[in-house]
């Protein structure tokens, strides 16, 4: 039996309402696009979402980066990771949460967005 392909059209046909992006994603994305936005401003905004903050600190303190000291400041983590990597972490965190309830045999959004 062929696997059902998950598409926007099939989701809408099932009557599922597509979720909107969380405010935190929109605010941080705007700050990341603004060259004048300081790391401290971005960090302050990120701290309003404990889940994303936790994911960011987990990422920067992972063996992958091999830092000699533990990072506990969101602003410091942002400085170390950079804006592009922060954007990827943010996208993964948000999409993983938004689409976790959508089931498809051919694609796992949770697997895709797990960092």
Image (cartoon, grey):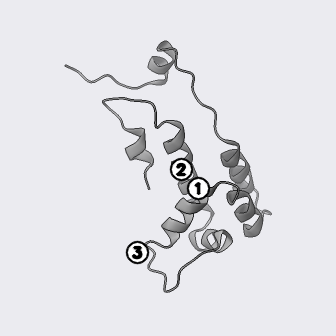
For the residues labelled 2 and 3, the Cα–Cα distance comes to: 20 Å
State the SS at label 1.
Answer: helix
**Which one is earlier in the sequence, the residue at label 3 or at label 1?**
1
Query: Farthest left residue?
Result: 1
Give the residue drawn at x 70%, y 56%. Answer: 48
**Residue 58 in sight:** yes
Q: Which residue is mark 2?
A: 93
Residue 56 spot, x, y in % from top left: 56, 63
Which is more foreground, mark 3 or mark 1? 1
Residue 32: give x, y in percent of width and height: 70, 57
| x and y percentages locating residue 83 in the rendered image | 63, 63
Where does residue 42 sit, x and y in percent of width and height? Answer: 72, 61
Quadrant location of the N terminus in the rendered image: top left
For label 3, the SS is: loop
Tell me the CA gap for discs 3 and 1.
19 Å
Whether label 1 touches label 2, CB < 8 Å: yes
How many other residues sit within 10 Å of disc 3, few (<14), some (14-19) or many (≥20)?
Answer: few
Q: Which residue is pictured at 44% across the width and 30% down the height?
A: 102
Give the structural element (helix, strand or loop) at label 2.
Answer: helix
Residue tagged 3: 63
- Report the residue at 50% width, 66% height from top: 58
Local packing at callout 1 (Cα closer than 10 Å; few below 14, some 14-19, many 20+) is many
Viewer-closest of 95 and 29:
95
Q: Earlier in the sequence, mark 2 or mark 3?
A: 3
Q: Nearer the viewer, residue 7 or 72?
A: 72
Residue designated by label 1: 52
The residue located at (57%, 22%) in the rendering is 17
């Amino acid at each position: 039996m062929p696997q059902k392909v998950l598409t926007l059209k099939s989701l809408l046909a099932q009557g599922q309402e597509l979720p909107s992006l969380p405010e935190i994603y929109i605010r941080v994305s705007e700050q990341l696009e603004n060259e004048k936005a300081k790391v401290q401003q971005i960090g302050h905004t990120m701290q309003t979402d404990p889940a994303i903050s936790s994911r960011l600190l987990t990422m920067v303190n992972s063996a992958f980066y091999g830092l000699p000291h533990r990072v506990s400041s969101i602003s410091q983590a942002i400085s170390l990771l950079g804006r592009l990597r922060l954007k990827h972490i943010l996208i993964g965190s948000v999409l993983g949460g938004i689409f976790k309830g959508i089931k498809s045999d051919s694609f796992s959004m949770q697997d895709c967005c797990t960092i």
